[in-house]
Image: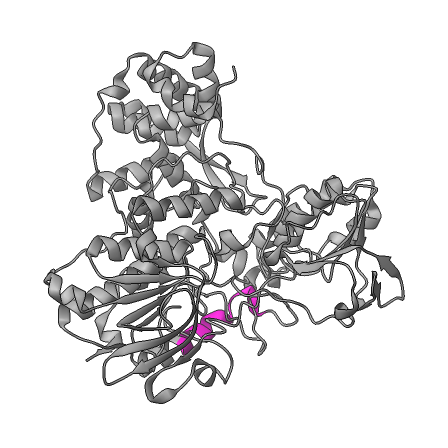
Amino acid sequence: MTVNRQSAVDMKESPVDSAFVARALDQANLNALRLALYQATGDEELAGMDVGSVPWWGGVFQVAVLSEQDSEKVKEKARAFLASNAESASQPHTPSNQELRNLIETFSGGPVSDFMVEMGREELSFDPYPRGVEWTREPSEEVKRDYHVTVIGAGIGGVAAGIQLKRLGIPFTIIDENDGIGGTWWKNDYPDARVDIASHHFQYSFMRNYPWKHNFAPAGEVQKYIEQAARDHDLIPNIRLNTKLTDAEWDEGRGQWRLTLEGEGAPELRTSAIISAAGLFNRPNKPDIAGLENFEGPWFHSTEWDHGVDYRGKRVGIVGVGSTGAQIMPRVAQDAAHVSVFQRSPQWVATVDGYKSEVSVETQWLFDTVPNYWNWYCFALFHAMFGDVEGLQNADPAWQAKGGIISERNDNLRAYLTENIRSKLADRPDLIAKLVPDFPPFTKRTVIDNGWFDALRRSNVDLVTDGIDHITSDAVVTVDGTKHPVDLLVLSAGFKTEDYLWPVRYSGVNGVTLEQAWAKDGARSYLGMTMPQFPNLFVVYGPNGQARAGGLFPWIEIWVRYAVHSIVHMIEAGAHVMECRQSVFDEYNARMDEAMTQCIWDIPGQKSYYLNRFGRTSANMPWKPDQYYHWIKQPDLADFDLR
C-alpha cells in the first residue's frame, strides 16, 4: 500500500484496513504506546506489565522495552481502542506531578529520579510551552519598549530566544551573517549532511507532532524545520540576515552594549542585553597544509561546499574522517572516479539501525490517531539518551584494578564497536588494522555509520593513513613520498571550537576583552553561559557548556530559558546591569577543574575538539545531566550583581 505523506494525516478521516493497522503496530514503540493507551483508558493491566532493556546506538544507550508476551497484549488493546474510535472522544489531560511520576515509573519499570520527572515533563510536551518564561510582575508596555535584546545567530538557539522574547513582548533583533535562517543547518549543506540524534528528540518542545520525513533528518530538513518555527512565531520581521557583528563594547554609564555591524541595515545598534547563539560549530577549521595555495583544482571546506563544482567522474581527496568526513565520503564515492580519504587517526564508528530510513506513513498515522502516543514516543528517546553516562565517561578505579582499561561499560562498548568493525570488514584485514582506534570510546565524538564501512570496500576508494606532507598543483603527497592525484580537494577538518564568540571583539567592563579574560588557559564561563566583567551577555552553548547526555535542542531551550529568565528579572527589578560575581565564577571553575579529572577527556595524549590549545577540556562539562539541569533551571540571583 503506497500512500503519500499527506494522506497519513487524511487517514484520520477515513477507515484503514486491518493490514495497515497491523503494520503500524509492528512498527510502534510498544512501551510508549502502552503509556498512551493507559492514559486514554485507565486500563490497569497496562500498568502492570514487565519492562526490560535492550542496547541501542551501538550499545551506547539502553531502551526500555516490554516482553514479547506483553507486547502482543498491547497490540491487542491498541486494535480494540482504534476500532472503537475511542481516540476521537479522548480529552487531553495534563497530569499532576504525582500522576506524572507514576506514569514515568510505569514506563521505566521502577522508581525514577526527580530529574527524570521534571525534565521528562518538558520533553513530554503536554504544556503549550514546556520551557516557557513568564512574567512574575509584568511591566507596562512603555517599560518594555525601553528594553532591547540583540540575539546573535538565526539558528536553533537564536530562533528559540526570539520566540521566548516575542511571547513576553520584549523588543529584540536577531542578526545573522548568513543569507538564510538555520545557522549550522543553513551553512552545512554538503552531500548527505545529517543529524546523529533521532529527529523526534532533535526538535523544539513546543512544536508538536511535526511531520518529520526521516528518522534522522538530513540537514535540509532540519533547516526547513527551524525556518518553519521562525515563520510560525512571526520572527521574520525581527531578523536581519547578511549582517555580521564585528564589535561589542560595554557602556557602563548607560548599562548597554554598543554593537558595530557590517552588512544590511544600520551599522550601529545599542542594546540592553545580548544573547549570543552563534554556537560551537560556526567557524571552520582550515588545516595549514603546505602547498595548498599551489593546488590548481577547486578546494573548499565542508561548510563552504561549492555546489557549482561537479565531482562526478573526478578524483576527489577528502581530508578528515570525523562526523563530517564520514558523512561526505560514501555519497561522493558513488559518483566520483576515485576517492582518496586522508585519515589522521581512526574514529569509533557506531552502527544505528534505521539511520537513513524514513518515518513511515503508518508511524505518522499512529502519531496523529492515538492521543499522547507522539508524546511518549518522544519521551522514550529522552529516557534512553539520559541514562547512565558516568559508566561510559568516567574511569572506574576498582575496575581498572582488576585489569580493566576504563570502566566495565566503556570497555564493553569498546569491545562491541571493535567487533562491529571486524564483522563489517571481515574480508579486509588491511582496513581493520587502520580503523580500530587505540583510544577509549567517548574520548572523542562517536561517529555514526553513514555507509562508511561499505564505502571503504569500494574499488574506487583508498584509505590513506600516512600523514600529509604537502600539496602540489594536482596531488596530495604524503610523508612516505606517495603522490595521490586529485582533481578536487575537500577539507572536512571540523571547526575551531575553542574560539568562542570569535571573531567578534567583545570589550566589557573597563575595556577588558574576552581575549584578555581568557588568556590564561582558554575560554571559561559560569554554567557555560555568563562571565564576570561582561554584564548582560548570555552565551548559548558557551565554554564548557557541552552536556554529557541528550540531544542539542533540549539543552539549547534550557540555556535560552536561563538567559531570558535573567532578562525578565532585570526588567522586573528595574535594574540595568546583571553581572556574574567574580567569586562565584572562580569557585565554580575550581570545582569544574577538579571534577574534570574524573572524566576520560582528560586522559593524557588525547586530541579532539574537546581540548583547547592549552590542553584543557574547554568544550565539555564534567557535571551529570541531572545536577546541571537543576543549576540552570532558572538563575540564582545571589550569583549576580544587579545594579
x and y, in percent, of residue 89 in the image: 22, 20
Please tell me whether residue 525 belongs to the stretch shown in magenta.
no
340 or 232: nearer the eye?
232
Of all residues shown, which one is farthest toward the front? 265
Q: What residue is drawn where x is 79% and y is 48%?
A: 314
x and y, in percent, of residue 228 in the image: 38, 44
3 or 89: nearer the eye?
3
Vertical order, 39 against 450 (above or below): above
Please tell me whether residue 593 belongs to the stretch shown in magenta.
yes
Magenta: main secondary structure equals helix
x and y, in percent, of residue 448 in the image: 61, 47
Q: Quadrant of residue 297?
A: bottom right
The reply, left or right, for residue 265 in relation to residue 219 is left
Any part of residue 253 in sight: yes
Q: What residue is drawn where x is 32% and y is 50%?
A: 119
Q: Which corner quadrant holds the C terminus?
A: bottom left
The image's colouring method is one colour
**Magenta residues, start to end:** 589-602
Number of labels in the image equals 0
x and y, in percent, of residue 92 in the image: 22, 31
The reply, left or right, for residue 413 in relation to residue 176 is right
Vertical order, 256 against 97 (above or below): below
68 or 29: nearer the eye?
29
The reply, left or right, for residue 550 in relation to residue 163 is right
The reply, left or right, for residue 630 in relation to residue 516 is left
Vertical order, 466 against 201 (above or below): below
Any part of residue 629 in sight: no
